[in-house]
Image (cartoon, rainbow, N blue to C red):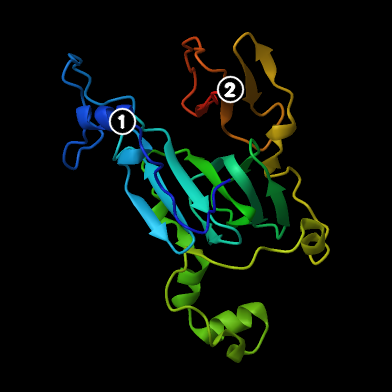
Amino acid sequence: MNDMTVAQPIKRQSRRQRRRAAQYPPRGSGAGHFRGATDRSRLDSNLHFPFAYAHNRLEDGGWAREVTVREMPAMKELAIVNMRLGPGVVRELHWHKEAEWAYITAGKARLTVVDADRHVTVDDLDVGDVWLVPSGVPHSIQGLEEGTEFVLVFDDGNFSENQTLLITEVMAHLPRSVVAKNFGVPEAAFKNLPKEEKYIFRLPVPAALDTIRKQLPNDPPPLPYVFHASKLAPNKFDGGSTKVIDHRQFPETSLSALIIDLEPARCAKSIGIRTPMSCNITSKAKRG
């Protein structure tokens, strides 16, 4: 994996990709409505939007870009975020009213979840693993030794990654006396609290998972928030393989996913998605 300490939002484009980008440029603020010169379609909204056209929020050690109903008007039920974190880099503890489903596409990540019943869970996830954080539940994400990149899917097209509630933001707006009383420590312990949100920031690569878990209460939630789908046996076909992730394997999830892995020069048959909270992820085939 490439050095992820430097933000790398977009890979170098081939000549063919540059020609295609010139043929289908975004148009003004309504970038979701781009159409080729030979396209005679009268669709009010397109069904395709490249992440390369999305605004990329660059931070120290990582970045995030999103496609929502604002970029792709047809996507009313879902919003998608692509995020990358370098080694040790943290997406700070935050929460939002939308449920969050995630799929690791590169590297390894550590997910920490603190729910309303005081269950604190910490898990490490590899490429192909998923998590589901329910609505309103605080959680944070940290890149491990290789850093990490992942896709986040939210159950509302109006979601925005830039409008989540961050723990630093909450602390900055509370009197220090209230914060100190809440945690049961002297007020002086919070003299160095940030005055504004951190969002994405650098920390050292964390200790091993077993070491961290020994410091926490052994009180897991009734249903796990993660599913190690990388260990799920694929359904093999001539030309590729598939995996289905739904509530049968992952009871906590409110979103089902079909993961398609295609070999070079192969094509997946068109399918119909019956429910709005379904996600179809196709991996890029490597040319050997």
- Point out which mark residue 194 bears: none
Disc 2, disc 1: CB below 8 Å?
no
Element carrying mark 1? helix
- Point out which mark residue 261 bears: 2
Q: Which residue is mark 1?
A: 15
What residue is shown at x 56% (from left), y 32% (from top)? 255
Decide: is 27 above or below 148: above
Q: Nearer the viewer, mark 2 or mark 1?
A: 1
Element carrying mark 2? strand
Q: Quadrant of residue 78?
A: top left
- The location of residue 243, given as percent across then percent down, is 64, 23
Decide: is 147 above or below 188: above
The earlier-in-sequence mark between 2 and 1 is: 1
Q: Do we see residue 144 in this rendering?
A: yes
- Camera-side residue of 89 and 69: 89
**C-alpha gap between disc 2 and disc 1:** 25 Å
Q: Amino acid at mark 2?
A: Asp
What residue is shown at x 50% (from left), y 29% (from top)? 277
Tell me how many marks there are.
2
